[in-house]
Image: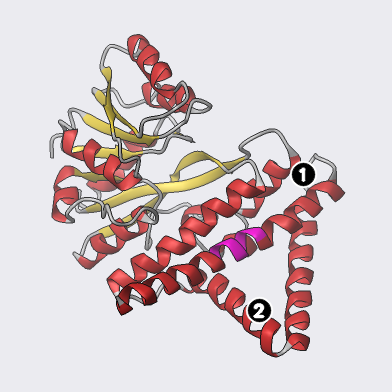
Amino acid sequence: MDTSKISVIIPVYNEEKYISEVIESINDQSWKEPIEIIVVDGNSTDRTRDIILKLAKNLKANREIRLLTNPEKSIPRSLNMACEAASTQLIVRIDGHTLAPENYISDAVTTLKSIDFNGIAGGRLRISPGSDTIVSTAISTAVCHPFGIGNASYRTYQGNGIVETDTVPFGAFTKQTWELLGGYDEELLGDEDYDFCLRARAKGLQILLNPKIILDYYARPTYIDLWQQYYRYGYWTTRTLSKHKKVPAFRKCIPLLFTATLVFLSVFIPTLFYLQLIIYLAAAAFFAIKASRPVKKPKIMFSLCLLLSFPILHFSYGFGNIFGIAGLIVKDRR
């Protein structure tokens, strides 16, 4: 495998707040070989493109930026455009609001090399607040807390060794792997990483998580943003699982089962509805209070914001599942 040059692909849309830091984190990689940075912009309406073009003039000698335009805006399409345009055999993906540690590329390549480049390698996400508010801090805590998102290894794994897992965020892979899998599914406007990893595993490829790789990901700053994000995750997860005819990981079932049960009980057995809701809120309050202990912000306010973050996270994902399933039923009847 030729590792003399590598391509970093970044799909973006209106990322003026973070794109400078993202590209600088790639420019500052410890990787000594040339890096081709391919940014695919979904017709941003802010200053994202201008910032990228300005940064392109101030990169290290063996770094270059190629800026492409995707009028369709969809992330899977942007990723396929970037992979197709890549002039290298090694591809590393990152998002427009995620910062890479300086060892990201070197550790990802080393991890891939351990399986003869037959798979996908990634790391853990370290969630940072999307703004300086207490609400944003609470949201960033909720989306990496086991009560919030279950046992997703890329957010909760605390071990030291490389482990095989079901999915990794973003990831590094070869262009040959991308071609073998037929690229990213452009009909899935969300959950594209999970689908990509599912297809890789179906082909006998390994998905490896290297805990030495820690990517800094900026969480959504407001409750509305959080709801929209996880509703979309829930909606497209049902499409992914329907496509693969696969039973999801148990953590992905809990929001659907919980939300559907509450809806059913609220209509047919109100007493049990209130009982289940009280039990849930008590559990959420327990974890919110416990998580607030090391926080320096006002603990009572932080606990209340975190207490609100949990149900928004769970119900948005659960209702996304429900409407995703409903959409599939309607589609099948046509």
Residue 296 pos. (x, y %): 80, 39
Residue 193 pos. (x, y %): 35, 53
- The residue located at (28%, 30%) in the rendering is 69
Numbered mark located on residue 37 in the image: none
**Any part of residue 109 in sight:** no
Classify residue 298 by image quadrant.
top right
From the viewer's side, name the closer residue of 96 and 269.
Answer: 269
Classify residue 237 by image quadrant.
bottom left
Residue position for label 1: 295
Classify residue 38 by image quadrant.
top left
Classed neighbour count for the residue bearing mark 1: other residues with Cα under 10 Å, few (<14), some (14–19), many (≥20):
few
Which quarter of the image is occupied by the C terminus? bottom left
Residue 241 pos. (x, y %): 35, 70
The local secondary structure at tag 1 comes to: loop
Position of residue 272 relative to residue 190, above or below, is below
From the viewer's side, name the closer residue of 199 and 309.
Answer: 309
Residue position for label 2: 262
Which quarter of the image is occupied by the N terminus? top left
The three-letter code of the residue at mark 2 reads Leu
- The residue located at (25%, 25%) in the rendering is 36
The part of the chain drawn in magenta is 312-317
The answer to whether residue 45 is magenta is no
Report the Cα–Cα distance between label 2 and label 1: 32 Å
